[in-house]
Image: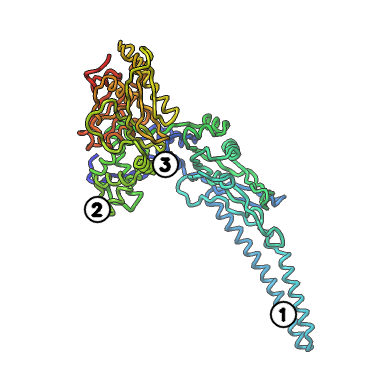
C-alpha cells in the first residue's frame, strides 16, 4: 500500500469492511443478514466479535421497523396489551391521546374553577349582606367538599394514554442492542414498583412497564457477549423469545407492586448473536445451543492470519481506523506502521502469521500515539512504537518482571564462557511470562556395577521432579541403545538451579540431557545458549508449548544461540535488532543437538 502517513489511507464507512482477518466470519455475517439467521461467535478476546455483531445490524434493512405501544387492559388493568405499529405511528398515537385528555381536563377544570368561584362569591355576598360569618364558614366547607369531589371524580382519567414502549421513528438502521451482563429484568423486561398504590395518586399499571433488551432489539440484532454469565432461567426465557418471536413482560420482584402485572405477548423478532470462548459453550443451555445450531451458524474467530502483502495492508488500514476513532492521537508514518506490523508478527507467535487480536494491538496504537503527543510530534514514528511497547506492558508481564527480579536462581544476565554440566532452559510463570532458568547435571559412580540410576535433587515439587526424571530416563535409554556401557554404571543427577515455586518447567528435557552428557564426558558447553524441547526414549526432540514466549525471553536476555525442536521453528519471531546477534538451531533428535553443541562426544 502506497502512503506517507495513515491520513492517506481511506477508512471504509461500513463496519463490516473494517473487520480485519475474519474472512470466514464476515461471509457468515452477510449470510445471516440475508436470511435472518442466528450466530454464535467463539474465539479469543479482542478478535472482533463485537464488531461483527454491530456490522450485522448495519446489513439488516431499516424498512419495516415498528414502534411498540402498551395500553391499559380492557377488562383487567393488571393485564395491559402491547401492539406493534409502524415506526413513527407510536408517537402519533401517544400525542393524540394526550391532546384528547388535555381537552377533557381543560373542560373539567373550567367547570371546577367556575364552581369554586361561584361558591366564594356567594358566601362572601351573603356574609356581607347578613353580617354573619356563618355564610363564609359554609362557603369554606362547600369548597373543601368540591376539592374532595374533584379528587374522586376525574372524567379525564377515563381517557387512557398509551405508553410508547419502544420507539424507532428516527432510526436509519436496524437496532443493535448489546445486552452483555444484563440481569433478567434488563434483558426480558420488567414492571417498576409503584410506592403510591392507592389514594388516587397511583400510577396506571401500563405506565410502569419497561421494555427489555430483547424487545428493544425487535427487527434488529440482540448481542450478548460472555454468554456463560447468563443465568439458566434467562437462557430458557431467551429460548422462548426466539421460538415465539414474542415474550410477555411481567414484574420480576416478588415484593414489588408490579408482580401482579403481566402484559400480553410483546413482539421481539430479533437476530440473536451470542459470543464467548470455548469454556462458555459448555455452560450454555443445551436447548438454546441446539436452537442456534438448527437455525443459525457457529464460527470460531481466527486469532491470526497469513503474513501477506494484502493482510499487511489491512493492518495499515486498521491503524488508520484506530487513529480516527480515537481522535486524540496523531497519524502514523510508514515506519511506525511497519513497526506495528512487526509487533503483530511477534504477537502471532508463529512465523508467517499476523495476530488479529486487534484490541490489544489497538492499545499499542494509542500508547504510541500518546508517546508522540508527549513530545508534541505531528506524526507517530517507529521509535514511539518501540517506546510504547516497553511502557505499555500487560499487567501479567509487569508482575512477571517483578517476580524475576525478586526470585532466586532465575537467570537475569546473559552468561559467558563454558561450563561442564550446566545448561540453560526456560520456564513459564503463572501469569504467562517466560523466564530463563539454569540447570545442572552430574555423573557419579554407582554403588555397584550396573546399578546406575537417574536422580533428581532440588526440584520445587513432585511435578517438577517427575519432568526432570523423565528426561534422565529418556537419556539413559538413548545411551543404552547407542552402546554406551559406562552409563549403566553411573548415577545421572539433575538439579534445577533456581528456587522459585509455581513455574511451568515443561520443555527442559533437551537442556537436562545436554547437561548430563556434558557431565558424563566432562565436555564444556557454551553457557550463552538456551535449549528448548522435551526428549523421548528414542532420542526425538518434541515441541514445547508457548515456544514464542520462551524464545522471546531468551532473545531479550541476550543469549547467542537458541536450540529448539523443528516443530517450534515457525514460532521464532525475533526483532530486527536481535536477528544478527541470536542464532537459531532447529533439531529433531538429541544426536543433532549434541553434534552442534558437543561435537566431540556426539552420539548416534
Figure quadrant of residue 424? top left
Q: Which residue is mark 3?
A: 51
Q: Secondary structure at mark 2?
A: loop
Which disc number belongs to residue 441? none
Neighbor class of circle 3 (other Cα within 10 Å; few <14, some 14-19, many 20+) is: some
Q: Which residue is mark 1?
A: 120
**Whole-Å distance between the Cαs marked 2 and 3?**
30 Å
| Among the two numbered marks 1 and 3 on one chain, the one whose residue lies closer to the N terminus | 3
**Residue 202 in view in this figure:** yes
Front of the two marks 2 and 3: 2
Q: Position of residue 543 (x, y in %)?
A: 35, 24
Q: Position of residue 440 (x, y in %)?
A: 32, 27
Neighbor class of circle 2 (other Cα within 10 Å; few <14, some 14-19, many 20+) is: few
Q: Which residue is mark 2?
A: 378
Figure quadrant of residue 393? top left
**Whole-Å distance between the Cαs marked 1 and 3?**
69 Å
Front of the two marks 2 and 1: 2
| Among the two numbered marks 2 and 1 on one chain, the one whose residue lies closer to the N terminus | 1
**Left or right of 519: which side holds 101?**
right
Amino acid at each position: 500500500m502506497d502512503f506517507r502517513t495513515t491520513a492517506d489511507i481511506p477508512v471504509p464507512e461500513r463496519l463490516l469492511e473494517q473487520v480485519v482477518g475474519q474472512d470466514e466470519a464476515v461471509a457468515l455475517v452477510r449470510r445471516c443478514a440475508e436470511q435472518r439467521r442466528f450466530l454464535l461467535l467463539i474465539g479469543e478476546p479482542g478478535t472482533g466479535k463485537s464488531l461483527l455483531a454491530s456490522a450485522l445490524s448495519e446489513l439488516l434493512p431499516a424498512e419495516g421497523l415498528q414502534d411498540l405501544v402498551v395500553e391499559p387492559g380492557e377488562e383487567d388493568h393488571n393485564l395491559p396489551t402491547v401492539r406493534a405499529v409502524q415506526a413513527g405511528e407510536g408517537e402519533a398515537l401517544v400525542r393524540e391521546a394526550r391532546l384528547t385528555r388535555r381537552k377533557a381536563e381543560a373542560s373539567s377544570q373550567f367547570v371546577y374553577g367556575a364552581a369554586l368561584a361561584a361558591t366564594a362569591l356567594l358566601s362572601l355576598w351573603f356574609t356581607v349582606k347578613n353580617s354573619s360569618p356563618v355564610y363564609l364558614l359554609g362557603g369554606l366547607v362547600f369548597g373543601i367538599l368540591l376539592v374532595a369531589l374533584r379528587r374522586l371524580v376525574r372524567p379525564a382519567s377515563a381517557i387512557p394514554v398509551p405508553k410508547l414502549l419502544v420507539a424507532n421513528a428516527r432510526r436509519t438502521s436496524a437496532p443493535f442492542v448489546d445486552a452483555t451482563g444484563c440481569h433478567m429484568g434488563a434483558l426480558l423486561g420488567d414492571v417498576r414498583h409503584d410506592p403510591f398504590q392507592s389514594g388516587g395518586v397511583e400510577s396506571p399499571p401500563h405506565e410502569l412497564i419497561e421494555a427489555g433488551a430483547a424487545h428493544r432489539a425487535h427487527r434488529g440484532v440482540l448481542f450478548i457477549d460472555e454468554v456463560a454469565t447468563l443465568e439458566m432461567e434467562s437462557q430458557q426465557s431467551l429460548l422462548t423469545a426466539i421460538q415465539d418471536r414474542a415474550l410477555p413482560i411481567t414484574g420480576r420482584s416478588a415484593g414489588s407492586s408490579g408482580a401482579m402485572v403481566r402484559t400480553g405477548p410483546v413482539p421481539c423478532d430479533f437476530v440473536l448473536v451470542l459470543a464467548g470462548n470455548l469454556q462458555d459453550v459448555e455452560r450454555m443451555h443445551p436447548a438454546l445451543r441446539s436452537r442456534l445450531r438448527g437455525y443459525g451458524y457457529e464460527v470460531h474467530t481466527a486469532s491470526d492470519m497469513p503474513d501477506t502483502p494484502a493482510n499487511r495492508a489491512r493492518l495499515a488500514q486498521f491503524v488508520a481506523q484506530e487513529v480516527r476513532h480515537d481522535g486524540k492521537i496523531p497519524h502514523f508514518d510508514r515506519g511506525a506502521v511497519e513497526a506495528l506490523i512487526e509487533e503483530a508478527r511477534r504477537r502471532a507467535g508463529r512465523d508467517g502469521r499476523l495476530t488479529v487480536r486487534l484490541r490489544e494491538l489497538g492499545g499499542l496504537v494509542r500508547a504510541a500515539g500518546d508517546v508522540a503527543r508527549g513530545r508534541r510530534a505531528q506524526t507517530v514514528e517507529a521509535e514511539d512504537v518501540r517506546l510504547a511497547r516497553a511502557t505499555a506492558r500487560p499487567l501479567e508481564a509487569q508482575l512477571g518482571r517483578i517476580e524475576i527480579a525478586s526470585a532466586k536462581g532465575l537467570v537475569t544476565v546473559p552468561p559467558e564462557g563454558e561450563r561442564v554440566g550446566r545448561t540453560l532452559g526456560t520456564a513459564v510463570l503463572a501469569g504467562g511470562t517466560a523466564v530463563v532458568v539454569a540447570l545442572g547435571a552430574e555423573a557419579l559412580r554407582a554403588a555397584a556395577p550396573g546399578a546406575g540410576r537417574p536422580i533428581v535433587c532440588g526440584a520445587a515439587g513432585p511435578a517438577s521432579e517427575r519432568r526432570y526424571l523423565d528426561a534422565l530416563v529418556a537419556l539413559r535409554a538413548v545411551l543404552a541403545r547407542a552402546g554406551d556401557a559406562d552409563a549403566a554404571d553411573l548415577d545421572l543427577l539433575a538439579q534445577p538451579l533456581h528456587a522459585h515455586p509455581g513455574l511451568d518447567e515443561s520443555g527442559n528435557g533437551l537442556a537436562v540431557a545436554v547437561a548430563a552428557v556434558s557431565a558424563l564426558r566432562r565436555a564444556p558447553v557454551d553457557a550463552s545458549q538456551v535449549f528448548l524441547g522435551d526428549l523421548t526414549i528414542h532420542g526425538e526432540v518434541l515441541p514445547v508449548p508457548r515456544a514464542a514466549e520462551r524464545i522471546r525471553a531468551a532473545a531479550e536476555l541476550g543469549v547467542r544461540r537458541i536450540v529448539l525442536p523443528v516443530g517450534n521453528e515457525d514460532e521464532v519471531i525475533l526483532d530486527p535488532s536481535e536477528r544478527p546477534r541470536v542464532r537459531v538451531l532447529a533439531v529433531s533428535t538429541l544426536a543433532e543437538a549434541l553434534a552442534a553443541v558437543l561435537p566431540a562426544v556426539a552420539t548416534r
